Amino acid sequence: MLDKLFRPKSIAVVGASANPLSIGHMVMKNLLDYGFKGKVYPVNPKTPEILGHQAYKTVGEIPDDVDLVNISIKNAYVPMAIEDCGKKGVKFAIIHSAGFKEIGEEGIALEKQVLEIAGKYGMRIYGPNSQGIENSDPDIKAYANFTFTPLSEGNISIVAQSGGVGEVLQLQLSKKGVGFRMYASYGNEADVGMNEILEYYGQDEGSRVIMVHIETLSDAIGFMKIAGEITRHKPILGLKSGKTKEGLKAVSSHTGKLMEKDVTTDVIFAKSGIIRFDSQDEMIQTAVALCVQPEPRGPNVAMITNTGGPGILAVDEIVSAGLNMAKLEQSTMDNLREKLFPEATVLNPVDVLATAVPEHYGFAIDALMNDPNVDSILISFVTPLFVDVDGVIEVLAEKGRTAVKPIVCVIMTLDEDGELIKRIMASGVPVYEYPETGARVLVNMTRYGATKHAPAPEYPSLAVNKDKAGEIIAKCDKGYISQVDAYSILDAYGIPVAKTTRIKTSDDLKSVTDNLQFPVVMKVDAKEVVHKSDEGGLVLDIADETELMAVFKNMESKFTRHDPSFIVQEQLGEAVETIMGVNNTEGIGPIIMFGLGGIFVEVMKDVQFRLSPLSKQDAHSMIREIKGFPILDGTRGMAGADLDSLEDILLRISRLAQDFPQIEEMDLNPVFSYGPDKGSKVVDVRIKLGSGVEVAAM
Amino acid sequence: MLDKLFRPKSIAVVGASANPLSIGHMVMKNLLDYGFKGKVYPVNPKTPEILGHQAYKTVGEIPDDVDLVNISIKNAYVPMAIEDCGKKGVKFAIIHSAGFKEIGEEGIALEKQVLEIAGKYGMRIYGPNSQGIENSDPDIKAYANFTFTPLSEGNISIVAQSGGVGEVLQLQLSKKGVGFRMYASYGNEADVGMNEILEYYGQDEGSRVIMVHIETLSDAIGFMKIAGEITRHKPILGLKSGKTKEGLKAVSSHTGKLMEKDVTTDVIFAKSGIIRFDSQDEMIQTAVALCVQPEPRGPNVAMITNTGGPGILAVDEIVSAGLNMAKLEQSTMDNLREKLFPEATVLNPVDVLATAVPEHYGFAIDALMNDPNVDSILISFVTPLFVDVDGVIEVLAEKGRTAVKPIVCVIMTLDEDGELIKRIMASGVPVYEYPETGARVLVNMTRYGATKHAPAPEYPSLAVNKDKAGEIIAKCDKGYISQVDAYSILDAYGIPVAKTTRIKTSDDLKSVTDNLQFPVVMKVDAKEVVHKSDEGGLVLDIADETELMAVFKNMESKFTRHDPSFIVQEQLGEAVETIMGVNNTEGIGPIIMFGLGGIFVEVMKDVQFRLSPLSKQDAHSMIREIKGFPILDGTRGMAGADLDSLEDILLRISRLAQDFPQIEEMDLNPVFSYGPDKGSKVVDVRIKLGSGVEVAAM
């Protein structure tokens, strides 16, 4: 529990100073300026008093208990200070000082030393190289941080790996007047870090919305568990930097850590129900709405506008994001027709006209609130000089207070002192400057609504022969395993594979004709031959026994130095080619891929990823979200695939990857799929074994 | 020339009133409040004086010349007022009054009457149902509009079809302190409209940037000519609403069906060099930069940052938009290494560190300005409490004044009174709140730079037999023409087609074997049979004469009621399938399509469009911008296509469509293309003739 960190009763500031440009001074000043409800003790051996408070030479000298210390002295002196704090019984130490892990070997050793000392006393370390924490709870008012955004009460909590990004987020929330609840930027994460803070925010009733900024996750599996729990009842908005390769380089030089590829962020966020953003602006705009409004229960948006042009821009945004303009009930339209000006438009968007009176807005909002086809309402209001703007604002504010469905407002007005906007915001309705922004925010709110109200993931039980697969794997060396073994493993997991016979010598060829029908395919099966077809290790269309023998002799002599085996397979008829794969990624476990095969995967990169274990919904959606889905669907005159069997195979390879973390990579390429109910079969498989990495359980 | 509209010496306000909620009152008030430099005459038969100015009963009674009138009386009285103005010799009448074309038949008649009266006197009409115009030129200060945004001097001019959108644009420019030059929202466009206003802005030296908002273009061809001229020397930023609306009439061709989205605006904007925006916010942010900064000469961005996190977000934005992070010269890095703090990062992004002093920013800006690999500079500055923020701002402002390459600044600061930002903006450097916004703006500025500095389009001369094609077309009826005719037309334009022989009776079959080698293809050729293969009118793989005769007999009996001809074609070998097409679109002329054939066009809709006439550059780029280009390129182990011959065919079909506007639709599907230098051939063609629509000349 981080109560003593975020809700301390007393704070000591080690390195507090009279120098206004020092971090210690700023922390003192922030604690005092923003009215910390507990006690503050400056610690400085050279000064008797700082900012009107008696200074102590050491933490040990402070006469009362100390929950939290902020340390900003030179790195070399930090271990001594920690020892002092430990003896005193301090619970948490925020270390602002830099010069630890981020500077290399020497700093790593120093950081280790600090952790060891703290460990002795059961004290927790926050940082080093960190900003600190803030808590705007009126009972606490702790600004244990050296930055400059004023503490202003709100219900959005922020945890940011980059202090710079965190500062921008809290700054903008503050400028927009919505404030924030708790703030944390934790630097080197030697001890207290992302997951624990996130969990704490999740449990804090005063935090209605959580914003996270991530560069790297030290424990992605733990993160997903915690975030996944939280997003069932409150939204987490996520920003991850380093999307592009160049962005990655900047991350490494900044933190000295390697970044994950961006796909990993997508799958992690998706698994956790986190709404992902690429832009701080859009994330902030969305938080401003979610901190006062409920999430929509569905994708149908209704709009009220008093001038056409801006409304159309919002419609464009809504429709291109895949939401719908709600189809109003006839009774709603009749009702509107009766109450609004005769020239008003009572279809959606409802155009009340520039000259509409305040009551018209009220009628329209009520009518849409009562229409069961409407999930959310966007109001776009340009303030003409000839109407009662004050009256309209009054109505919007009043309706905002009683709204049962989310309302988002766009007001295009001069409003030089921001008075109009403040009045509406105070009623709990978020206000934006542009219709596109309002629409975008509704889109993001709806994304969260869909996440929160999604049915629980189903993990169907599958009949698999784990023991058999385990036996085969136990016999294999690390690296690529033989194809015969790979097919056997798939078979043990109930994954349909093309009929295959193993051949070692020409004597074995007899068994082929017993088991398979011509035409058949012959492939070399040797560990060193990875790209079979490039090396002449794959022959198709073998028509009869004579040909089979000829092919065998030829291959045998070609690959003799590899001590090869060979496999002969039934040659499958034409089908839709798909590709599936597994990449067991350090720190997060197996990522499962699905795509259309051949040229689609080569050129169009039309693939989807999900994190294992796949739920039924994951398997279902990843197939349907590839762009080439119509090819599988069998629409537009195409034969289509057996979607059920593809889903089943995906679930089984997820289970296999889950059960055997030593499967580092697996390519099922191609997987042929026939029409509906006609099944799918794996035609080629490669499995690479490694040492095994941790795998997430669900 | 619109001088008397935008630079009038005297304005009469017909419908001026003491009622503060009337349009006439507001126009009067705006003209007076914003200090119109000419004379203002209220016209109102019932009042002796309005806002301290003597009122006249009619325009005729005004003792001086009147350049412009603003009319806001009831629609029915407008014709009388126009007659009065005409007699007086008024040059322009802005009609605010609604109740004209937009209300249907009655209004259409009234609008026609107004135009006729104005025509008699050589008076120009602006509107009806229009906002009006504004001109902030200090010599003029004309606010002949009833809206509420204050007139503030600037160099951005706005022309907006939607008054609501126009209002938002000028409002935001005003709020951002950059103001605007001229403003126009022209309502029904009975006379003065988009093109004339755009041309006027283009010639106005005080307009450095132009913003346009379009819903529909009444003369798209004229628009492209005018805009195309302007964008060679100043940027036009374009916003088009109604992206997602299905505005296209029913079309039967493949090409037409693929034009589902907002293709027409894309091709019009592309042909005109207009930078397209989907969001008002982004358009405004970009205008704020282009109105003070030059456009970048290339795609290489350098960044200076004092905190890692926010910088990474900007890098992500830059790189995902296809720009580059500039690779700095070694000498630049050496120079920076010497001048900055030892811990600073001298790679791009240059991280001067949070504690950097003002001189460091100066050094870094100078070094990047002097690096030939840098085309533009983005500065990302979080204002820490412990540095000399004022000093840094001073340096940024100073460097801004002498910049030879575009600089864009992001300042993340509390700056409650906006003083810091104003100081930098005053030096001509645009300032943004978020790194992503700054990056996005640089991306858009670079888009304009690429347009402005692109080499002039080349229209290579092509040897075509226009007379022959004209003769064939002259003989054809409207609707789908026979395939034999279609092939002959392509042939006349030098477009390679599969070898084809026409067959009417079985006697003609003899000629086939003289001209073609087996295997061959037979197709029915009858006007009513559009989907040949669905109806059994296409047989492939005909191996010899016997088979040919059998196929012929079968088809002849099947299609006998259509009085069919047949064609026999050489059966071409395997090749890359592409598709080309033409859709002659009312108001803008032929749109040319190119894409990969088969499943790619059916499912992935991987096609590109350009407006005819195609330049060499158009043909070159449209082939390279399809996502499946690697398939044509022959990379990744694929055979590839003959790109030169594909370009040549595209240029020729553009020329054909240009020469014969009566070609309404044309599908070349498939066009087979063989490897480099191996040519391409049209395998199937459908041409539909119509009455002919106007076609743009270049």
Image (tube, coloured by chain):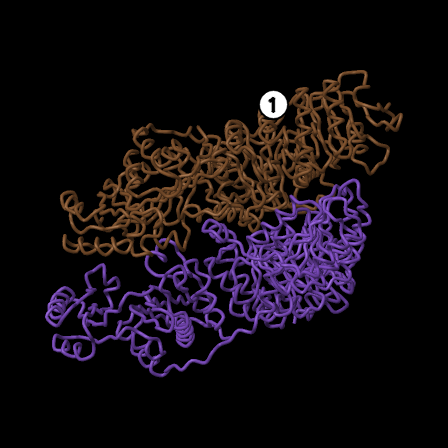
Chain colours: A purple, B brown
Q: Position of residue B495 (x, y in %)?
A: 29, 37
Q: Position of residue B667 (x, y in %)?
A: 36, 44
Placement of A291 over or under B104, stated as above or below: below
Q: Say if residue B5 shows up in the picture.
A: yes
Of residues B156 and B108, the one drawn nearer to the viewer in this rendering: B108
Quarter of the N terminus of chain A within the rendering: bottom right
Q: Position of residue B299 (x, y in %)?
A: 46, 38
Q: Identify the residue at the far right of this view.
A: B48
Instruction: Give the residue at x 36% y 38%.
Output: B620
Q: Position of residue B609 (x, y in %)?
A: 43, 42
Which of the 4 quarters of the picture holds residue A518? bottom left
Residue B334 horizontal side relative to residue A71, left or right = left
Number of numbered callouts drawn: 1
Per the image, the residue denoted by label 1 is: B205
Which of the 4 quarters of the picture holds residue A289? bottom right
Of residues A231 and A395, the one drawn nearer to the viewer in this rendering: A395
Q: Say if residue A49 shows up in the picture.
A: no
Which of the 4 quarters of the picture holds residue B542? bottom left
Placement of B285 over or under A14, stated as above or below: above
Give the amino acid type for the residue marked by disc 1 in the picture. Answer: Glu
Name the chain under label 1: B
Q: Identify the residue at the far front of this view.
A: B561
Q: Identify the residue at the far top of this view.
A: B64
How packed mark 1 is, by other alpha carbons closer than 10 Å (few <14, some 14-19, many 20 or more), is few
| SS type, badge 1 | loop
Residue A258 horizontal side relative to residue B307, left or right = left
Placement of A695 over or under B462, stated as above or below: below
Residue A56 horizontal side relative to residue B570, left or right = right
